[in-house]
Every structure is written in structure tokens, then in C-alpha cells.
Image (tube, rainbow, N blue to C red):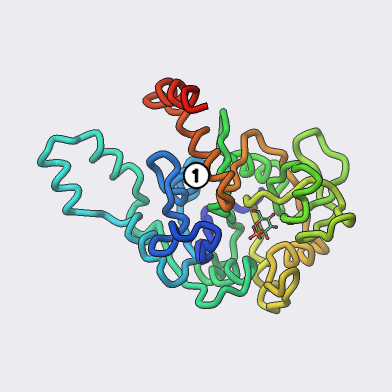
Amino acid sequence: MAAPVRKAVFPVAGLGTRFLPASKAIPKEMLTVVDRPLIQIVVDEAREAGIEHFIFVTGRNKSAIEDHFDRQPELEQALAARGKTAELEALTRDLPAPGETSFVRQQEPLGLGHAVWCARELVGREPFALILPDVLVQSKGKGCTAQMLDVYEAHGGNIIAVEPVPDDQVKNYGVVSIGEGDGRVFPIDFMVEKPAPGTEPSNLTILGRYILQPEIFDILSAKETGAGGEIQITDAMIRLLETQDFHALKYEGRTFDCGSKMGFLLANVAYALARPDLGPAFAAEVKKLL
Ligand code: G1P
């Protein structure tokens, strides 16, 4: 039986240059989709999947993330005094329990692979989920990470969530080439990070959700640089593919790349429309705007 996946790594050290000036004094992961910060939404997704420990790879000026997952006694007292029990309950419900979070600093922006490597001591020698908070997946049923853990239980090894994107966008992502599968889960036989146009092995891109085995850290320790002069997680996965199985999952759900303004705006619209308390009235107002 495959070893259980108990921990998730969230790389949150990025500067967020695409969201300036909004991300000047607050981390981009604290930008909100309706009333929940991006980082909270992906932590919720991990928790729904049964993840027990949340590891954040942070950088300078990211302390708001640590504060967000801490108690706020003054606020809690104020809410209690005003009888706002629903808000108080929601605040406490969202919090990981004491000891369930860890924070480590990346120190230098050397790439996603380097950020993941910074979590090696906190993860230890066990499989883990890697979740990029820029990418939200709105699912009808189980969340993307829970879907991936189902596939992991069946296949073991390493799992990558993939989605087809229009041909002209493939160059912005890690890309996989797959063998024969069942329409949903496929063995991966090749990967490449940000392929030059014309050299793409497929239009199936790596979305930002991974289940990885700890041997990835051994490969990342070599600190080899790849696309963009950065230490790439995809390059380390290509090496790991020489000795371990990787499966791609075409997950159920709609993806929003909140690293881009368009994706972030669309996420806000989609998540607002899906909210029972806001959706109908919001839809009516948006129709008027259009
Ligand atoms: C990273 C990964 C890439 C993946 C993408 C998903 O790229 O390196 O393989 O497809 O995230 O968002 P970045 O967006 O950091 O350039």
C-alpha cells in the first residue's frame, strides 16, 4: 500500500510583481476571492483532502500569511461581545489546529524547485502534496487535491494534475506527454518546462497540484538550473521519472490562474456566482453592468 500523504507544501515566496501595487504591502496570496484569501482557499482544499500538516515556504514581507493562520484574540473578543457567533465560529473553524502549520523562508528567489527543496526538513522522507496557491480549481464534487489522492491510492508513485490549454498558451507552463490511459488517468512518459513554441509534446499542461515522493528532494539538492535560469520542479520530476512512475490526472473542475489579472477577476466572478448568499443578486447586478 502507498504511504499516506499527510503534508502539503505551499510555495508563497513569490514577489507578486504582476499584481503591483496591490501586492506591494500585502502578499499576493492574501488577495481575496470574494471574502477568502487565495491561500485560505487552497488550504481548505488540502484540508478537505485529509492533509494534516501545512508547510508554507515564505519570503520577506509575507508575515501576513502567518498572522492569518494564527488566533486573533482581540477580534475574537470583540465578535463575542457583539454576539456575532456565526462570524466567530467561521474564524475558528478556518484555523489549522496548533502545531499543524510550519513556515520556512526561501531567502532567495531561485525558482519553484528551490522553494520546494527549502521544505525538505519539514516534509521528511514521506510523500507530500505540492499546491501552488496561484491556481484555484472550482470543483462540483471533490476538490482537486482530494481527486489526486484517490488516484494516488490506486497507483502510488507521483501524480500530477493536468489540463489542456489553447496551443498558444502551452509555452507558459510545464507540459506532459502521456501514454494510454482510461480517459482520466494516464501514465506520463515525458515532461518539459515551458517548451519553445513548435516543440510542445502536447497541450496538456501542469496545473499546480502535485503528489510527489521524497526522492525529489535528493534530485533538487543538486540545484541544477533550467528554464529561465531557475531551479525548476519540472526538471527534477523529469529526473525522477527515470526511476519512478508518474501519472497525470485530468481532474474535474474549472481552473483559474490567479497569477494573472484575468484569471483572478474571473475567479472572483465564478466564486461569487457559486455562493448561495451572494450568487443570485450578484448575477443580476453583473447583467446590468454588461
Ligand atoms: C510553475 C511551474 C509550471 C506550471 C505552472 C502552473 O510555473 O514551473 O510547470 O505549469 O507553475 O501555474 P510558473 O507559473 O511559476 O512560471
Q: Position of residue 244 (x, y in %)?
A: 77, 59
Q: Position of residue 79 (x, y in %)?
A: 17, 42
Q: Is residue 266 left or right of residue 102?
A: right
Q: Residue at x 64, y 68 (%)?
A: 113
Q: Is residue 194 left or right of residue 118?
A: right
Name, please, the residue furthest toward the front: 289
Which residue, given by chain and number where applicable, does mark 1 sit on?
50
Closer to the camera in the image, 127 or 25: 25
Q: Is residue 225 left or right of residue 136?
A: right
Q: Is residue 242 left or right of residue 288?
A: right
Q: Residue at x 75, y 35 (%)?
A: 184
Q: Residue at x 68, y 72 (%)?
A: 231
Residue 247 seen in this snapshot: no
Closer to the camera in the image, 76 or 109: 109
Closer to the camera in the image, 204 or 146: 204
Q: Secondary structure at mark 1?
A: loop
Q: Position of residue 144 (x, y in %)?
A: 60, 41
Q: Position of residue 161 (x, y in %)?
A: 68, 46
From the viewer's perspective, is residue 247 above or below residue 101? Answer: above
Q: Quadrant of ligand 1?
A: bottom right
Q: Quadrant of residue 241?
A: bottom right
From the viewer's perspective, is residue 285 above or below residue 264? Answer: above
